[in-house]
């Protein structure tokens, strides 16, 4: 073989060593096998050292180029070994902290869903929207005037007592209902008024199966000339039939609220037993869903409306209670302690 073929053969040998060495380095499963690959290819008696001994047979003018190729191969292998050593060390650290069990099934992503109380609130608002009602909002931190006095509730009334209300400062409190929104709207707008006021209310109630100190409430108000109890009852009947079903019956029971006169509790026939009596309705066949009544003239006087000219009706309901009835939830605390898994069923 002529001397001109020697550099070519050396380059081919170096390329073969490079390929075989890279395959062995990448295939090293642990530090021990990686060290064996290093000794085999880069050791003092390794394949690369033996190949470089052939430089003596290369013509002097071609030795620099051949030496350059040999150094590039050596640097490539040394870099590959360092990288693989870091990878193996990282894998070893992870296996010590949390071994990967490839037999475990994958976890599907959580989807979540809209909270059942939010679903009920949106549906209530959509139904009353068909009757011309719009949503209104107000502050959760209120003055005692908006929360009590403007609604014909004197400050010596039991509802205004510190044992029932969260006071933040003198004359400042967390609203106990969303009725202050009605007062604010009437003070800012002339009749006609038709609003729904959904939002949080706060009372010093115990946290048990049927009570919570913070809860959602939806209140409604309609004010105009000529509104009477017949229109009021028709509106409530329309809501009940749209929400609970056309066969649901309503019952108005006389009651007392300072801001309405006359006042009534609204019951609906039990959707569980269809009025025949069961544990849900306490064997009565009826379930209470809201308090309501015609707006007391004293409220109109407080907000600047002419009680001789305008009349109206108001109502308030707890959407959490309605959600419990609709979805068969026995304990109100489930609604406040719900996680993503609970909400998935409402998606």
Image (tube, rainbow, N blue to C red):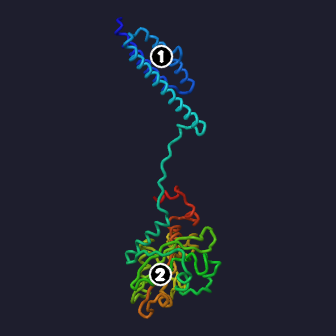
For discs 1 and 2, the disc positioned in front in the rendered view: 1
Q: Is mark 2 on a helix, strand or loop?
A: helix
The answer to which of 193 and 290 lies nearer the viewer is 193
Left or right side of 65 for 339: right
Left or right side of 130 for 51: right
Compared to residue 166, the image places residue 157 above or below, namely below
- Residue extending furthest bottom? 308
- Quarter of the image for residue 211 reads bottom right
Residue at 58% x, 36% y is: 93
- Residue extending furthest right? 163
The answer to which of 295 and 170 lies nearer the viewer is 170
The residue under label 1 is 48
What is the CA distance from the residue labelled 1 to the residue labelled 2? 89 Å
Dot 1 crowding, Cα within 10 Å, few <14, some 14–19, many 20+: many
The answer to which of 31 and 263 lies nearer the viewer is 31
The residue under label 2 is 184
Please indicate, yes or no, whether residue 10 appears anywhere in the rendered image: yes
**Looking at the picture, how far across and down is residue 295, in whole percent?**
48, 86
């Amino acid at each position: 073989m002529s001397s001109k073929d020697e550099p070519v053969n050396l380059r081919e040998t170096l390329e073969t060593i490079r390929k075989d060495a890279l395959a062995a380095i990448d295939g090293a499963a642990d530090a021990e096998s990686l060290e064996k690959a290093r000794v085999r290819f880069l050791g003092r008696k390794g394949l690369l050292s033996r190949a470089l001994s052939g430089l003596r047979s290369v013509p002097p003018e071609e030795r620099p180029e051949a030496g350059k190729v040999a150094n590039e191969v050596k640097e490539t292998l040394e870099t590959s070994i360092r990288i693989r050593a870091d990878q193996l060390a990282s894998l070893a650290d992870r296996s010590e902290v949390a071994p990967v069990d490839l037999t475990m099934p994958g976890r599907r992503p959580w989807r979540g869903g809209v909270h059942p109380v939010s679903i009920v609130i949106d549906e209530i608002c959509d139904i009353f929207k068909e009757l011309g009602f719009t949503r209104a909002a107000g502050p959760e931190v209120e003055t005692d005037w908006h929360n009590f006095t403007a609604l014909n509730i004197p400050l010596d009334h039991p509802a205004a007592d510190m044992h029932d209300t969260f006071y933040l400062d003198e004359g400042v409190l967390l609203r106990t209902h969303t009725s202050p929104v009605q007062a604010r709207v009437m003070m800012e707008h002339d009749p006609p008024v038709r609003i729904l006021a959904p939002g949080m209310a706060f009372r010093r109630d115990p946290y048990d199966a049927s009570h919570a100190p913070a809860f959602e409430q939806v209140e409604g108000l309609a004010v105009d000339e000529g509104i009477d109890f017949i229109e009021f009852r028709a509106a409530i009947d329309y809501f009940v039939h749209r929400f609970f079903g056309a066969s649901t019956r309503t019952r108005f029971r006389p009651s007392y609220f300072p801001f309405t006169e006359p006042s009534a509790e609204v019951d609906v026939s039990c959707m569980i037993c269809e009025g025949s009596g069961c544990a849900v309705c306490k064997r009565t066949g009826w379930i209470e869903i809201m308090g309501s009544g015609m707006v007391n003239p004293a409220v109109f006087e407080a907000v600047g409306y002419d009680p001789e000219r305008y009349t109206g009706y108001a109502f308030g309901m707890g959407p959490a209670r309605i959600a419990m009835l609709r979805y068969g939830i026995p304990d109100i605390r489930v609604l406040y302690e719900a996680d993503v898994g609970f909400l998935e069923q409402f998606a």
